[in-house]
Image (spheres, coloured by chain):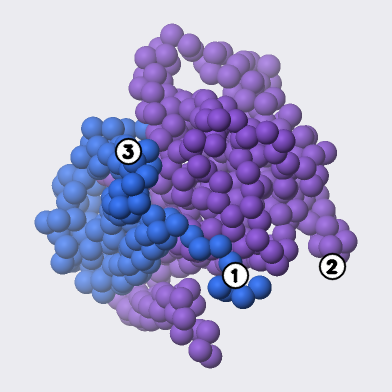
Amino acid sequence: MRRLLKSPWLEVNVMLAVLIICYGAMAIISWGAETPAGGMSGGTIWLWLFGFFLLSFGIALVAVIGGIGGGVLFTPFMLAFTPVDSLIVRATGLIVAMFSGLISTGPFMRGGLASLRVCIFCAAAYGVGAFTGAQGAIYVAKNLGEAGEGAIRLALGIILLSLAVYFVVGGKKIEWPQVKKVDGFTKWLKLSQPYYEFSLGKVIDYPLTRAGGVLAAILGVGLLSGFFGLGAGWAIVPAQNLIMAVPLKVAAANSGVLLGMGDCIAVWPYLLMGAIIPMFAAPWLVGQVLGGLLGALILIKVRAGFVRYLLIGFMFFGCFGLLSKGLYMLGVIGPVPLWATGVAFVIIFGIITRSIIRYTKSEA
Amino acid sequence: MSIEARPKMPVAQIVFGEIVYWITVLSCLICTVGPLLSIAFPDNNVMNPHYLFASIWKGNSSDVVWKEVGGAFPGGHFYFDHLTKGDGFTQFGLALGCSVALWGLIGTAIAYFRERVYLYVVLSLWVGALVALAMVGIVGLH
């Protein structure tokens, strides 16, 4: 009982209580209210608001554990299944991408699973890259044409595919990378920071290396992210893990914090142009905060292997999207039907779920 | 392992985490209460929710939605003038949450300055400045 009155459960309980009271009151008011001519009935509005909250909660849970922005799941499905305008969807997608990262920042910073120095170091480079990319997009889009954009997407898809395959065969090396030599620049930055790993019950002190390399990589990721308006979680985690030797769970936690920080810059143009509509975006924000907090508490406790499998799933799915879109833009294939994307999603995550179950049994 | 034996986190890291966390919780509470105010008092909104949702589900662009339901888009920081309205209050919650990194980074820069870690003071202020410039409409990433 005492535990429920301590942080983080105290604020979770307060948020849940306010949520239940507000949505309960909204339900009563909505169903009793008269519908104005040409408007939507209160009951239907309530159903949409509550449905948005539930969907957002589920997306946030998975996104935080994988260290990706929830927008990767939200935006394509909203664009595919609803008639809502694409700018409104993309703007709300940023809210979905950032708030699970923002709320998970608290538990990650307190426990040390994320490192603020690594996050600020990467955010500085990401911000420059993304800004340059966004400005460059306006100029280059006129000269590059659709075929050029298709070729870049295809190249990204192939890079992501190679990374996903490396994550499959890399095993423990990926989860806990070994560093043989720390270079002078990384040592000067003082990025390493030990933390207590709950799943192993011991303190992990991880040396880092090649900070210059990760700076260049994150700059490149930011450039592409700003240029194409892509989410970047799928690239930030492997960049930290493979170049700088950040343990996988720490890289996923850092990525969440970094996305929250970076999207605080990216979201404002949408807010200032009116693409974020308060009543439409609010339930998504609330779902992200509650789901993201729960996801963060789970990530602190789960084993690194679980995170690796989840990331492999996201990488293969992202790769499917990039390759199919790239081939379509190059005129090699026709538009990929929605059912094919759905089938790819079900197959990839079916295999991932099976692998996670087998992994959990073998670790038990 | 006892809590005492676990590594102590740097002050700047705790400061950033706590500022971002608690402002996000506050923003979530505002965005939970805001829609209730909008539904309870539909006429006390910049955009009446009954017409707003009908317009969004028609596939209208944000410009058309604001024009059709609210007359015109009242500006990016419209919530300052409409805090007592349901959607104005909700938008305030959204804007507060979207600015949270700035407040966290200011706190972090102060903490690093007190620890004399000047490199991270500069990096924190640099990222914070990007958020601030985005808030006033000078920097846009997408």
Percent position of residue A132, x then y: 38, 23
Quick one: label 3, few (<14), some, or many (20+) residues within 10 Å?
Answer: some
Q: Which of A123 and A334 is in front in this view?
A: A123
Chain that the image shows in blue: B
At label 3, which amino acid type do we have?
Val
| Residue holding disc 2 | A364
Disc 2 from disc 3: Cα separation:
46 Å
- The numbered mark 2 sits on a residue in which chain? A
Q: Do the residues labelled 2 and 1 touch (CB within 8 Å)?
A: no
Element under disc 2:
loop
**Residue A12 drawn above or below residue A313:** below
Task: Pinpoint residue B93: horizontal percent, then vertical percent.
Answer: 29, 60
- Mark 1 and mark 3 lie on one chain; the one further toward the N terminus is 1
Of residues B58 and B18, which is closer to you in this image? B18
Q: Quadrant of the C terminus of chain A?
A: bottom right
For disc 3, the marked residue is B122
Q: Distance between the residues labelled 2 and 1?
A: 27 Å
Which residue lies under the disc numbered 1?
A: B5
The residue mark sitting in front, 1 or 3, is: 1
- Residue furthest to the top in view is A143
Cα distance, mark 1 to mark 3? Answer: 32 Å
**Residue A281: in sight, yes or no?**
no
Q: Residue at x 50, y 42 (%)?
A: A190
Comparing labels 2 and 1, the label whose residue is closer to the camera:
1
Q: In the image, residue A251 lies at what x, y percent?
A: 60, 46
**Where residue A274 sits in the image (x, y, percent)?**
27, 44
Q: Is residue B112 left or right of residue A180?
A: left
Secondary element type, mark 3: helix
**Marked residue chain, label 3:** B
Residue type, numbered disc 2: Ala
